[in-house]
């Protein structure tokens, strides 16, 4: 699996004002807490620079003069400052983390809510692993921005302002000496930013690729094992994982150079302060008399220098957070802004208690907007009728179901239920009246009871048992250790294919639909289970409109009408015997299946004789 990271995917702005304004909108519900957090952070940021100033007072005013009583008082003041600094730091950390978690919760819920509204077409184009990355890794990257990025950046900025204020109030000369190293520091910082800018977006891209790869190959691990593809899968994963490792190593390399560079600059500043301040302190005694450089000022400046470079290093870390957040937010908003949704009517019509009449009128449809998979399809299913749809693979059978469920909209023509166009009915109202059983059944992790009722509180336990009994699922459910509370595991891994299909039948029937759709629902079921389902559903289908897409023609011989699709067009319609007598496509399909079944029976009989 080759992974190409295109230049347009990895290059971008370190700071994007448009994205940041959108992110700030998520803080609006917590603006009071944010304001309090900023005030606490500003107050906390001033406590640290106050300590060297108190140290200067202690040395110059009390230690040098031998005033032990005054020294004790300044020690108490210093203790109080340290205590309040600790309390404010606790309050700031807790509040900012609280804001961050609340905001992240809101964003994650918005993404999931939007994903549930997106049309099926969107999921056809986007791997599950990539979407999982958006909801997990990318959202978590924003957590650092909201919890320790925005508010704490204010703290770092105000810490620098407080330090500079105290430094210039103590000695303008020493303050200017300290600031002489700033051009070097700015150059190091700009070089660092330039080098790491592209690596963060590349890392996000590769994490999404890895998640998509893992989801696909863990789900399809049996195929890899059956065809001995483990080695090729490993090599493909090694290629993607290697690119992620290299991107991370590059990022770490730049940080490994940046922090020692800042430390070296800090050491140079300390050396300049000791040289300049010490020289004046030794050779110019009158400076102390005239308010010049004293021993207390010199020691305070050494402490200020250490404090001054700490928030600068922290701001560089905030830049890392900002880079990651910009890349992640760009991907998150790309999902949120996606309009691959089925448009809903502004004034939807109410279906109410429907009779179940289905009409397709001159329906044409293309998934890509160009290549039509359905062409001028027209048919009517009257209330209570069972309509069967047959045809070769790719004839357009499942597309009819997709349009009926309004997973997609028709390209031309219209689909109607009881005379209501599906475009004028809300999707929720439509799907409340239709149940579908597909060939590829899906079970959620959880109990058998949950998978039948799907959390619908209106479906009682008795109704769940009744539905299971009607399709014959109660026989195997009663043999399970926990019966209806048995955990079916992820995707129903604890059950056989036939058992999972029986549960999906019970699920559809428990929701008591007026329209029932069976999309090759018995294609993966053994003959015994198929006969069980056929027997259980014969009476149930009476009074309901049902559309049956069948692979086995033997299961639809009693349908009210059989529609034969060929290359997206209706070629034949009628009952089983009528179509057999016609001698057309349906007759040939029936003959092929009959001969295949006959050959299989002969092989089984021959094996039994041997």
Image (cartoon, rainbow, N blue to C red):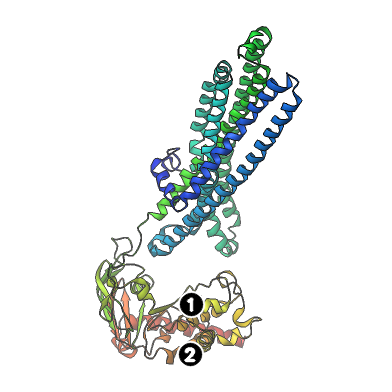
Q: How many marks?
A: 2
Question: Foreground mark, 2 or 1?
Answer: 1
For the residue carrying disc 1, how many other residues have a C-alpha within 10 Å: few (<14), some (14-19), or many (20+)? few
Q: In the rendered view of the protein, which quadrant contains the C terminus? A: bottom right
Q: Residue 568 has which mark?
A: none
Q: Residue 456 has which mark?
A: 1
> What residue is drawn where x is 40% and y is 88%?
541
* Depth order, front residue of 455/284: 284
* Depth order, front residue of 130/438: 130
- Above or below — where is 33 with respect to 286? below
Regarding residue 294, the answer to whether it shows in the image is: yes
Percent from the top left, x then y, of residue 160?
Answer: 54, 30
Question: Disc 2 designates what residue?
Answer: 536
In primary-sequence order, the first of circles 2 and 1 is 1
> As drawn, is 424 to the left or to the right of 134?
left
> As drawn, is 435 to the left or to the right of 169?
left
User: In which quarter of the view is residue 49 placed?
Assistant: top right
Regarding residue 519, the answer to whether it shows in the image is: no
For the residue carrying disc 2, how many other residues have a C-alpha within 10 Å: few (<14), some (14-19), or many (20+)? some
Label 1 sits on a secondary structure element that is: loop
Q: CA distance from mark 2 to mark 1?
A: 24 Å
Outermost residue toward the top in this view: 283
> What residue is drawn where x is 32% and y is 60%?
368
> What residue is drawn where x is 45% and y is 58%?
111
Percent from the top left, x then y, of residue 351?
Answer: 31, 79
Percent from the top left, x then y, of residue 235?
Answer: 58, 50
Percent from the top left, x then y, of residue 412?
Answer: 24, 68
């Amino acid at each position: 699996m080759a992974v190409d990271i295109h230049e347009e995917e990895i290059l971008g702005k370190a700071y994007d004002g448009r994205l940041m304004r959108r992110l700030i909108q998520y803080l609006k519900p917590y603006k009071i807490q944010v304001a309090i957090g900023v005030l606490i952070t500003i107050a906390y940021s001033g406590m640290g620079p106050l300590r060297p100033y108190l140290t200067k007072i202690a040395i110059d005013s009390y230690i040098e003069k031998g005033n032990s009583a005054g020294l004790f008082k300044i020690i108490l003041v210093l203790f109080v400052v340290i205590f309040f600094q600790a309390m404010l730091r606790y309050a700031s950390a807790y509040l900012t983390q609280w804001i961050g978690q609340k905001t992240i919760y809101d964003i994650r819920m918005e993404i999931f809510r939007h994903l549930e509204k997106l049309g099926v077409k969107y999921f056809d184009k986007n791997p599950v692993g990539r979407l999982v990355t958006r909801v997990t890794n990318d959202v978590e990257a924003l957590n650092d921005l909201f919890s320790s990025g925005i508010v704490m950046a204010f703290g770092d900025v105000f810490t620098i302002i407080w330090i500079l204020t105290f430094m210039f109030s103590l000695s303008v000369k020493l303050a200017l000496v300290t600031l002489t190293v700033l051009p070097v520091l700015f150059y190091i910082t700009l070089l660092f930013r330039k080098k790491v800018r592209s690596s963060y977006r590349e890392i996000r891209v590769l994490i999404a690729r890895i998640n998509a790869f893992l989801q696909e190959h863990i789900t399809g691990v049996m195929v890899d094992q059956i065809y001995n593809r483990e080695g090729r899968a490993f090599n493909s994963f090694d290629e993607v994982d290697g690119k992620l490792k290299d991107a991370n190593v590059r990022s770490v390399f730049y940080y490994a150079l940046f922090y020692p560079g800042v430390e070296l600059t800090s050491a140079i500043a300390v050396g300049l302060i000791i040289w300049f301040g010490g020289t004046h302190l030794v050779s110019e005694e009158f400076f102390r008399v005239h308010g010049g450089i004293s021993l207390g000022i010199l020691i305070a400046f050494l402490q200020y220098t250490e404090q001054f470079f700490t928030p600068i290093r922290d701001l560089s870390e905030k830049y890392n957070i900002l880079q990651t957040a910009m890349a992640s937010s760009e991907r998150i908003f790309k999902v949120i802004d996606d309009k691959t949704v089925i448009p809903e009517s502004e004034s939807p019509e109410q279906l109410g208690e429907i009779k179940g009449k289905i009409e397709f009128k001159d329906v044409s449809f293309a998934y890509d907007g160009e290549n039509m998979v359905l062409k001028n399809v027209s048919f009517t299913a009257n209330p209570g009728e069972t309509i069967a749809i047959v045809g070769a693979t790719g004839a357009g059978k499942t597309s009819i179901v997709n349009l009926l469920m309004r997973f997609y909209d028709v390209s031309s023509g219209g689909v109607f239920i009881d005379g209501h166009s599906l475009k004028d009915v809300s999707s929720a109202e439509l799907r409340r009246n239709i149940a579908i059983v597909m060939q590829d059944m899906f079970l959620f992790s959880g109990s058998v009871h949950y998978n039948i009722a799907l959390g619908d509180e209106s479906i009682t336990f008795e109704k769940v048992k009744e539905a299971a009994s009607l399709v014959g699922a109660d026989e195997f459910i009663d043999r399970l250790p926990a019966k209806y509370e048995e955990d079916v595991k992820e995707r129903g891994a604890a059950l056989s294919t036939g058992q999972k299909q029986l549960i999906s039948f019970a699920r559809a029937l428990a929701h008591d639909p007026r329209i029932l759709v069976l999309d090759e629902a018995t294609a993966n079921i053994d003959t015994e289970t198929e006969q069980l389902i056929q027997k259980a559903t014969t009476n149930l289908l009476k009074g309901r409109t049902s559309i049956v897409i069948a692979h086995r023609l033997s299961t639809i011989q009693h349908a009210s009408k059989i529609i034969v699709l060929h290359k997206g067009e209706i070629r034949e319609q009628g009952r089983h015997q009528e179509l057999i007598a016609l001698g057309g496509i349906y007759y040939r399909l029936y003959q092929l299946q009959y001969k295949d079944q006959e050959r299989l029976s002969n092989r089984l009989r021959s094996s039994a004789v041997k």
